[in-house]
Amino acid sequence: MLKIIVYFLLFISSYSMNYLNISKLDTQSRKGIIFLNINSFNKIGVNLTKSKKKFILNTDIGKYYLKGDKIVTLHKEYTYISKPFVFHGKDYIPLKLILELNGFHLKDNEIIKSSEPKNPNTLPKRVISLSPGITENIFALGGKDLLVGRTSFSKYPKEVENIDIVGTMFEPNLEIILNKNPDIVIAETHFREKLMTTLNSLNIAAIKHNTPRNILEIYRNITNLGVLIGRRLEARGLNASLKDKVHYTQYILRDQKIPKVYYVLDSGKTDITPGGDTFINSLIELSGGENIAKEKTGWRYSLEELILNNPNIIFGNQRSINNMLMEENYHFLSAIKNKNYYIINDDSIFNLPGPRALTEGIYEMVKIFHPKLAEELKDIY
């Protein structure tokens, strides 16, 4: 079982140097998205065909079907925004989406092979997740049939209730884990190294993913997890879907005035907010806001800094907002005086670095920062 880890950690560390320029290809541009004529895809080595009302994409790892606004894989379907269209009798397909599904990406108008880990020697059939974020990603990758254990902190999606609990994130029950006979146990940064060593000593393959600190690392974790559990095809599909929606959101928000915002995780004796080295800071920026704590690292903030930077908008959980309303020191803030504060009923949509944060999380932030534009994003999230 430990071979899973050994082979999984053998990453492809370099990009392909066979760059291809797209400037002379038959393209169209709509809402900031480049579409390529279906017949031009062969020129860049992409096997894309049309059959009735669907497009069939053959890649190095398997086959995708594009039906309407859906990317269809063996285990999962994903929606996307930049749907194909017909112009002068020719079909145009979103270039970035197709490249992502093929394991490539655009950089400076050139097509570059993306870095992906190699397939493990043996694919796991029984997986235990010790992180809510990992659990969410496994479900998003169509891997719920592999999941035999999760922690009490994992509560999304709702179907997770059918998966047995093996303890908490910080205190997993080793006896229960052993009885589950897992092929692999997957944790995140919070997990203590001593427990990882114990699991490995019991001949249980255990691997720890770094908790993402930005959006790119969310995509990378999805890719790595997809390869690890045999859902590489779904990982590309999920990432392509997420990137397509994020790109469209950025296009919608491109000319908007950016408000200064403060996301409060805790207030009172200690002020807690995400600094510039956190993925939540990236979410705020993608949603058209400026995090007043972006120059800080980590999560701690001071009342003096908060008053000095004086945000236009404050949002957070009800307990933290209520603390600010009751404490006179916060009444100097414009957002408090102007009642420009917002209570988030379920802040897990921001706090767990996964697909939900990049969909529901971004949408909820846009509703707060740019409410007039949120309607344009309502249907995609």
Image: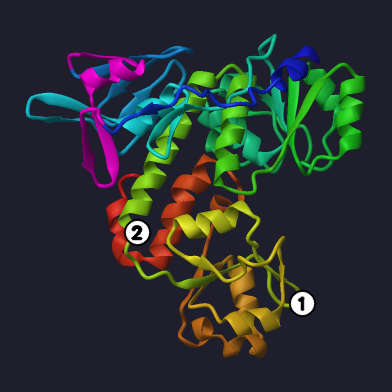
Name the residue carrying label 1: 269
- Establish if 95 lies above or below 32: above
Rendering coords of residue 377 (x, y %): 32, 51
Q: Is residue 182 visible?
A: no
Rendering coords of residue 198 (x, y %): 91, 27
Task: State the quadrant of the N terminus.
Answer: top right
Farthest top residue? 121
* Magenta residue span: 24-52
- Establish if 272 lies above or below 103: below
Residue 47 within the magenta-colored segment of the rendering? yes
Label 2: element kind: loop
Sequence-first tag of 2 and 1: 2
Rendering coords of residue 301 (x, y %): 70, 72
Amino acid residing under circle 2: Leu
Amino acid residing under circle 1: Lys
Q: How many marks?
A: 2
Q: Residue at x 64, y 44 (%)?
A: 212
Q: Residue at x 28, y 46 (%)?
A: 32
Gap between marks 2 and 1, in whole Å?
A: 36 Å
Q: Nearer the viewer, mark 2 or mark 1?
A: 2
Colouring mode (rainbow / by chain / secondary structure / one colour) = rainbow
User: Callout 2: few (<14), some (14-19), or many (20+) C-alpha neighbours within 10 Å?
Assistant: some
The quadrant in which residue 99 appears is top left
Rendering coords of residue 367 (x, y %): 39, 62
Name the residue carrying label 2: 253
The quadrant in which residue 14 appears is top right
Asked whether 283 or 296 is in front, the reply is 296
Q: Residue at x 34, y 47 (%)?
A: 248
Q: Is residue 372 left or right of residue 304?
A: left
